[in-house]
Image: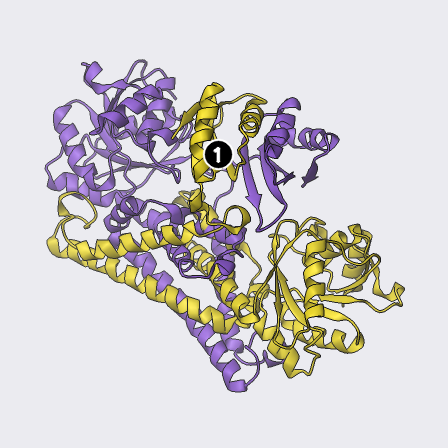
Chain colours: A yellow, B purple
Amino acid sequence: VTLPAGVHVRIVGTGLIGTSLGLALSRTGAIVSLDDPSTTACALARDLGAGVLAAEVTAAPAVVVVAAPPDAVAAVVVRELAAWPEAVVTDVASVKLAVLEDVSALGGDLQRYVGSHPMAGRERSGAIAAQADLFEGRSWVVAPGPEAGEAATAAVRDLALAVGAAPTRMTPGAHDAAVAAVSHVPQVAASLVAARLRDLPDSAVALAGQGLRDVTRIAASDPMMWTQILAGNAPALRVVLEQLAADLDDVLQAVRQLDDASVASGGGPAGSGPSGTAGRGSRGVLARAVASGNAGHARIPGKHGAAPTAYATVTVLVPDEPGALGRLLHDVGEAGINLEDLHLEHGIGAPVGLAELAVLPAAAEPLTVALLQRGWRVHD
Amino acid sequence: VTLPAGVHVRIVGTGLIGTSLGLALSRTGAIVSLDDPSTTACALARDLGAGVLAAEVTAAPAVVVVAAPPDAVAAVVVRELAAWPEAVVTDVASVKLAVLEDVSALGGDLQRYVGSHPMAGRERSGAIAAQADLFEGRSWVVAPGPEAGEAATAAVRDLALAVGAAPTRMTPGAHDAAVAAVSHVPQVAASLVAARLRDLPDSAVALAGQGLRDVTRIAASDPMMWTQILAGNAPALRVVLEQLAADLDDVLQAVRQLDDASVASGGGPAGSGPSGTAGRGSRGVLARAVASGNAGHARIPGKHGAAPTAYATVTVLVPDEPGALGRLLHDVGEAGINLEDLHLEHGIGAPVGLAELAVLPAAAEPLTVALLQRGWRVHD
């Protein structure tokens, strides 16, 4: 899918997303004009190749993309709708219902406004971190309001397709409920877990492992930006946070009961050995919490948004030498089997690695047979 | 540091940790004997090169490492102390005070028992996931009780050093408080965040990004094992969970106030545009929560004690078709470069995937050049 040749896209806001979009669209042959309250930021995006300065273009844009900070988005959208009465206007804010309601309250033309949200980002911000391929292979939610025109919606969808993203249509409310669970609550949890490290002794923090690093990686995010995002999605965030708090309270009650039981019994904590007979119900609460996490985790998509649990895994020993993995995957291809996912495990200096080949369940046995015939060591 | 030449180490429990330890110790020239209630599991560890079957060794061990499931550890430690009256006995359970108290309650020789905890693990369990380098560069807590002998403590320290770990001496209580914050509470948070995904529509889960994947990676952990760990550390876990629940309640109250204010004002949610004047105090709570997370995250140590993550990543676009990944890895092999790790990422409905190739830093640029020359699209 390509945009109409020479289409003029105006980008307002030349941070990470706006500049990346300008870079990507410029590659498609679109005319991209750049605007930003900061002339320095705008000139930087221009110098990086994201487009030309808006002042240098007199033609009206066909599409305006507002990539402003969350708090400013609605006002800028309304201004752009008024300034360009023929243009489709979209924004890329990570909350959609609040922006739509504010655009409506401010009298913006709701037929030409189609909110959207590219699910792409980096830990780094600003034009300097921009990448032309930032959107490639990523979801891009297109969230038209009830009054949005179909042609306007299609224009935003085509914009997403043009930069290699996978557009997904959702209502603004469904979008906000989704990001509350998959983005905003994880951010809150990461921040709160990381906050517990502030007052630990150095010797305790020194025990941090990969699990803690993973859980808290996004705790390094910008407080100003996240305050705007979390506040902007308060209605949907509230629902998921209340469920999270209730689940946490269940776990906490169970842990309290196990602690109290161990003190009452005069033995060690209830978790180990002979004193571990107390609190079976409490242990059930803990087991269910972790098992529910298993079930939720299993739903996170692998390839093509499908549940990764639908795949079978074939594990193969791979000699740790150049080309060995290539030979393995060549043999997989020769067997006519498509890999759904692949993960390589090996240690430093280990003479072999383990390649985990995820395939459709029906392909697991033929693949195993084919690889064994070709001399590979295959494990279940 | 090396163990005495030909020292005999007995490992009881041939799961991930026991087998990895056997692999690592065997490389140092130690005699490793393996025991496990499951003869199949034990034979697998032997076949992988972790040591010899215990039945084949008649000499008494100098050191016994109990790598049994948490609930069984104390009883096995006491049995081993009695069976080998000259041996130092350690365990590798992730909770230390409960084990010590149970060993004491069961009448074990507290002078020869020195609990320990290697801060190493994987999402996968069992001998098949074992790695000889699992402990390299990792912390290994040595947590002697008040009655433990110095020679016994030194023997456990030397064992940790021999397999490349960094021994850290802590009291059992200090250890348990530390792991509550850096390991057990992150596990609870990851599980609870992942559990919120169970009942989401597919379209919502499809928006999952890297942030969610990171936060919830350890939510795939084994419920049985984690129930034992969390229950075993109830006293220390309770303290940190209560703080976490209080922090979460603050955030929830702020989000409720922002939601209520936006409903009362009749405008959109309070997060954006002109209706965003309500709830400055609530926004302050959110900003402080994220900023506290920044401060806690900044305390996590970098490279030292971290997973060996000093790799550079080269990201390559791979067409979603049979054999494409094989061609890529063939080309990597042709370039004479050894992959350290590989991860594949696909978006929903995207015609391409992203292969993330991890290589030694010095190999990143040559690899990029070689792949570009062969026609691959390479990202930084």
Q: Residue at x 31, y 41 (%)?
A: B170
Residue marked by disc 1: A357
Tell me, yes or no, if residue A200 can be seen here: yes
Nearest the viewer among A270 and A1 is: A1
| SS type, badge 1 | strand
Residue A168, image quadrant: bottom right
Disc 1 marks a residue whose amino acid type is Leu
Where residue A46 sits: x, y (%)? 81, 56
> Residue B7, how many percent across, how many down?
28, 17
- Res B29 quadrant in image: top left
Q: Return the residue nearer the eye: B354 or A18.
A: B354
Nearer to me, B151 or B328: B328
The residue carrying pointer 1 sits among few (fewer than 14), some (14 to 19) or many (20 or more) residues within 10 Å by Cα, namely: many
Vertical order, B298 against B76 (above or below): below
Q: Total label count?
A: 1
A47 relative to A257 in the view: left or right: right
Q: Quadrant of the N terminus of chain B?
A: top left
Q: Give me the residue at 66% from left, 49% from top.
A: A136
Q: Quadrant of the C terminus of chain B?
A: top right
In the rendered structure, the residue with mark 1 lies on which chain?
Answer: A
The answer to whether A129 is drawn above or below residue A69 in the figure is above
> What residue is at 47 percent from the left and 81 percent from the top?
B260
In this rendering, position of residue B111 left or right of residue B137? left
- Residue A121 x %, y %: 62, 54
Q: Is residue B246 visible from the viewing direction of this image?
A: no
In the image, is residue B151 above or below residue A171?
above
Q: Residue A161 placed where, x, y %? A: 69, 55
